[in-house]
Image (cartoon, grey):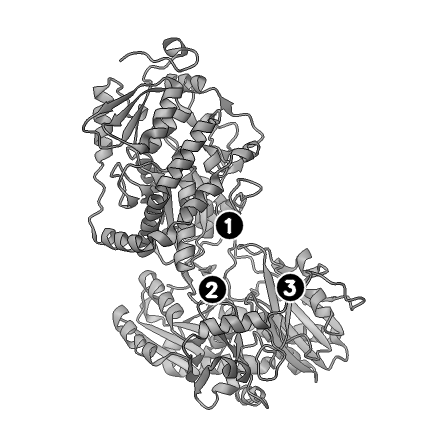
Amino acid sequence: MGEHVSASREEAVDVEWSGNWVAERLGVELVGDGELRELLGLALRRNPKRAHLLVSNVLGKHVPQRPSVVYGAGFELGERVRDLLGETEAGCAVVLGYAETATGLGHAVADGLGVAPYLHSTRRPVAGVAPAGGFEESHSHATSHLLLPEDPDLLNSAGQGAPLVLVDDEFSTGNTVLNTIRALHERYPRDRYVIVTLVDMRSGADQGRLAEFAQEIGARVDLVARASGTVRLPDGVLEKGRSLVASHEKPSSPSFVDPGPRPAPVRVELDWPAGVPDGGRHGFTPAHRAALEAALPDLAARIAAALGDARRVLVLGFEELMYAPLRLGTALEDATTADVRYSTTTRSPVLAVDDPGYAIRSRLVFPAHDDPADGPGDRYAYNVAGAGFDAVVAVVDSTADTPALHAPDGLLARLAAHTGQVLLAVVPSYAPSPTPHRQEAAMLPEPLRGPAFSSYAADDVGWLLQDLSDTVLEAPTEEREEAIQSGGAHYAESLPVEYQPSPQYQELFKAALATSAARIARAVGTVTETVLAERGPRPVLVSLARAGTPVGVLMRRWAQHRHGLDLPHYAVSIVRGRGIDANALRWLAAHHDPADVVFVDGWTGKGAITRELAVALEEFDGFNPEIAVLADPGGCVRTYGTREDFLIPSACLNSTVSGLISRTVLRADLVGPHDFHGGKFYRELAGSDVSGYFLDTVAARFDEVADAVDAEAKELLAADRAPTWEGWAAVERISEEYGIHDVNLVKPGVGETTRVLLRRVPWKILAKRGAGADLDHVRLLAEQRGVPVEEVDGLPYTCVGLIHPKFTRGATGADGTAVTAK
């Protein structure tokens, strides 16, 4: 490998340093080892946390470089780690690389170590593969990392004697790597960690943290870097950087302008070795490495034959797919006399300036072509246009070989405009071996999302439901009540006719929302901060449809607004007496770590759903049965925003404040053993929809309540929050006192009382004496339905709704409004 290392030093030398342009305009200084300027240039990007970008000349991401140089840089670091650990520890080490930038570097480090299995984080969820962990990259524009090893014991198989080697292209503050170690150490503790990086760019203030951190976790933590230094940033550099980017960004151009005739891409059939993964997304073993090494000469020969007499060739990888194209590039160097370079496409938006003193000279923009989980968006290839390549070999995995790749504005067309020949080589996306659990989960569909299902935005929530919108499920309220109480039907087998609010009631909703928005925002912030502190760093929010869904969306928005976190959020069905949707849990377990799942609901009444969930989860490993709620007047949970019983305006309405989705349905003739529970999308009610209005009104108060939330969350985290079950005791007392003798017909709290008035046949309403505006909508609904409101003393709730205990249409009137006296 010595020739690779010496070559890397030669190739990195340039006439003008590619950081001069940024340094001169922003006053940024790069100081450190003599090799540092050869390894790094500077560029600018739009990022609220860091204006400058360190652009590596030997990483093979933004700057095309000889493949042997890129591979040699990582391989040499792996050799140094092997020398540091010694043969015994090196022989059982596991290497972990970071997506997307360091996936190829980490793989090369694992090769240098010799016999280490390799895994890299990924931003691509894969159906049927349960995450072994996940973490956030705080300074990145796209933060969420998943660990998806095919072998669930990969990170723990060798016990504490196996060092974990973590590889990233730069070590700046160290936050990302140290947070990863902390999270993994809790789950897979070990005695030794080694951090590997091309450049150690920590400030003096950050350099002391590594020893402190090692002492904190009780393990040895070493650092291996090729070069070290730091970036000195003047005051106001973020603002100056933003202004500089704004002044040099070109106006938006049409998404596609036909440049005229250009070469059609030629597909090269690689004959990739069977069973060899395309990379380390699910793990890459020494046996895989040996099989790939044996196949590389033939793979390169196929590409060389298709290239013909091209003299300057770029092998272009694809986002996380860095190692396979890198090794194809090194083999191509050996197989031809052409000048071969290597780089990859990326998600990162960076300003391009055609100046020799700037690291990013040109930029190609094209749509994402692998149907990414976080939705469509632009992708980029840097320093390709204008670089004089005779041919470009685009290497993608089969997941990314989509119509979008071949579209008139896709990557292949963008490349064809700047080179004489475009080859496409497709590596088969590795599919982990199926297990019964994965096969079962693979049978389930992906979550439903707006606007096709619900009026919420697609990234607000994924509904783990089946769409029953075309099925007639509604029954008159009185018929449903009689069937439910007679035992002839379960409440989840039909739907009430959707209540259409009068203009007076709609105005009441808006007034209530205006009055309570800041109060709700505080509760949202407090419960979210509590969840992040106790269940972080990247919880998966799973709201209990449908009352929990608006709360889950707001919690997701708070985490995004205050912390830049993009938390996954799903809605699942739970039915009293029938349990939670087991298939939804199987889907969640296949796509996320169950330990990261946090169940979310709107409020607690007497705690029936809290108990239902705890019982239901006894059959599923790894899920925490605790529910996080906005309001816990019943004292049933330990994670809440408040324990006050106040009006949450989302309880005032039905689907029109919940994304136009019905309550969930579970009926044997509609929901089979491999189906999600059902739900309906009431598209026809779009004119009355206030779902977005509710969310936006509350979210607009987030900044206003931030200080109060910080204080309340801090206080709550230090407090005894053990459930008191005060509400359950009160419900039992009321049930007996009023001769009902069924706690299911007693609905405590403002939210549950509202539901009684909207969906059931109410008997009477108990209101705390002196309760004010929180009950205005309850009084109006009660008046409309002819239900008495009785003020009482000693009530632990603001109000309690009582369902008629012996309902028949004969006893109460066919319209359900007449009331039988107690």
- Asked whether 46 or 683 is in front, the reply is 46
Q: Identify the disc placed on residue 558.
A: none
- Asked whether 793 or 387 is in front, the reply is 793
Give residue 278's position: percent from left, percent from top: 57, 65
Tell us which disc is closer to us: 2 or 3: 3
In this view, which residue lies farthest toward the right?
261
Give residue 401's position: percent from left, percent from top: 65, 59
Q: Specify whether residue 687 is in view.
A: yes
Q: Which residue is mark 2?
A: 121
Mark 3 Cα shell of 10 Å, populated few (<14), some (14-19), many (≥20) = few
- Which of the two labelled residues, at mark 1 and mark 3, occupies the earlier sequence position? 3
Give residue 330's position: percent from left, percent from top: 61, 79
Marks 1 and 3, how far apart at CA: 25 Å
Q: Which residue is mark 3?
A: 252
Marks 2 and 3, how far apart at CA: 33 Å
Kindly state the secondary structure of the residue where label 1 is placed. loop
Mark 2 Cα shell of 10 Å, populated few (<14), some (14-19), many (≥20) = many
